[in-house]
Amino acid sequence: MTAAQLISFARGAPSLDIVDIEGLKAAAVRAFDADPAGVTAYGTSVGYPPLREWIAAKHGVRPEQVLVTNGSLQADAFLFDHLVSAGDQVVVERPTYDRTLLNLQRQGSELHAVSIQPDGLDTAELRKLLESGVRPKLAHIIPNYQNPAGVTLSLEKRHELLDLAAEYGFTIFEDDPYADIRFRGEPLPSMLSLDTRGVVVHASSFTKTVCPGVRVGYLVGPEQLITDIAKRATNLYISPGMVSEAIVHQFCVSGDIERSIRTVSTALGERARLLAESLRRHIPQARFVEPDGGYFLWVELPSDVHVDRLAPAATERGVAVVKGSDFLLDGGHHSLRLAFSAVTVDQVDEGVRRLAEAVEAVRGR
């Protein structure tokens, strides 16, 4: 089977048909016309100043509280490097983004995984963990349309988490790249916007709303923390990419980003709906929470379906998936993450049909 024939539920990236290529081309021309010196120079370690100001206005903070980075994963890495030392305790969601686990393990941190429920992190379980004596430096939370579980942290739990952070003295790292990709329900306020006690550091990205190739993310936090991290960034790379950041800035100030968000959200809403329908039809024993936004749906399969056998069987049948065990410190052997962002409408049902064939082929083996 050729790469073109493969249906991939593996990659959390948008398909080309929902990327605003013409808008990006026009934004690039405007960027070079408006600020050729700024676009082509080294720039500063805090990022392209006009984009920094736009992000600050979006979140209602001062520009000095914003650091623009080469993708949000770099924002994560900067924060982990700054706050987390070997042996420090860190709370993560169970499951959580696989690269988060890898980066925190590389830091030498002691990870404590707290269960995810349909309305987000189990705050009662977290409180018990804290009452048992665990004292985390950081809690990493993906509040909206979580990767990989697809669930959203409820407003009540956002407030509970803020209270716990203040009571037990840890930082909430609100990792929030999917917030704008909502296709059902009402938007919830970020924990950053609710924070009155300085316990939240927020990260996001233009990967999901513009395109992955721009590699523009950002960190929002207390001014001193941003200043300290910016010094490290200067020594690491002098500055992030001014060209891509200037293009993103023009894309944002023109209003193109709002149109792009509508396009992406509408398309992914349809794909998510079709994926849920296909799973119910072809794999009725699968359990999942249908997401209200984002890129991902998490599937729990019967206990006689082991994903170490299922993943290669699915590939043989022309469909790519990611094993749930990749997103957990332990377990997940009967779970999958399905990304619906890169599959077109006409591929969804066929992809699930192929996956169902693979499920039947490995059951009980």
Image: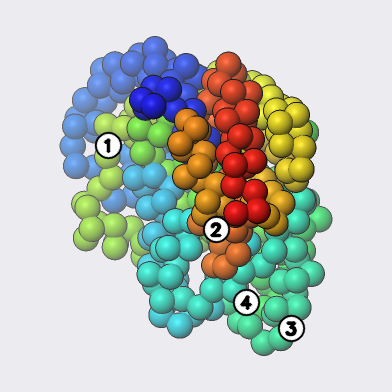
* Image-based side of 105 in relation to 325, left or right: left
Task: Name the secondary structure under disc 4.
Answer: loop
**What label sits on residue 131 in the rendered view?**
3
Q: CA distance from mark 1 to mark 3?
A: 46 Å
Name which residue type carries label 3.
Answer: Glu
Residue 171 at what x, y percent from top left?
Answer: 57, 68
- Mark 2 is surrounded, within 10 Å at the Cα level, by few (under 14), some (14 to 19) or many (20 or more) other residues, namely some
Task: Name the secondary structure under disc 2.
Answer: helix
Q: To which residue does mark 1 refer?
A: 242
Residue 209 at what x, y percent from top left?
Answer: 51, 30
Judged by depth in the image, the label closer to the viewer, 3 or 2, is 2
Q: Confirm or deny contact between disc 4 and disc 3 (CB under 8 A).
A: no
- Mark 3 is surrounded, within 10 Å at the Cα level, by few (under 14), some (14 to 19) or many (20 or more) other residues, namely few
Task: Name the secondary structure under disc 1.
Answer: helix
Q: CA distance from mark 2 to mark 4?
A: 31 Å
Earlier in the chain: of badge 1 and badge 4, it is 4
Q: To which residue does mark 4 refer?
A: 169
- Mark 1 is surrounded, within 10 Å at the Cα level, by few (under 14), some (14 to 19) or many (20 or more) other residues, namely many
Earlier in the chain: of badge 4 and badge 3, it is 3
Name which residue type carries label 4.
Answer: Gly
Residue 346 at what x, y percent from top left?
Answer: 58, 16
Q: Is residue 203 above or below residue 355?
A: below
Q: CA distance from mark 3 to mark 2?
A: 28 Å
Judged by depth in the image, the label closer to the viewer, 1 or 3, is 3
**What label sits on residue 325 in the rendered view?**
2
Asked whether residue 227 appears in the rendered view, the answer is no
Judged by depth in the image, the label closer to the viewer, 4 or 3, is 3
Q: Confirm or deny contact between disc 3 and disc 2 (CB under 8 A).
A: no
Q: Confirm or deny contact between disc 1 and disc 3 (CB under 8 A).
A: no
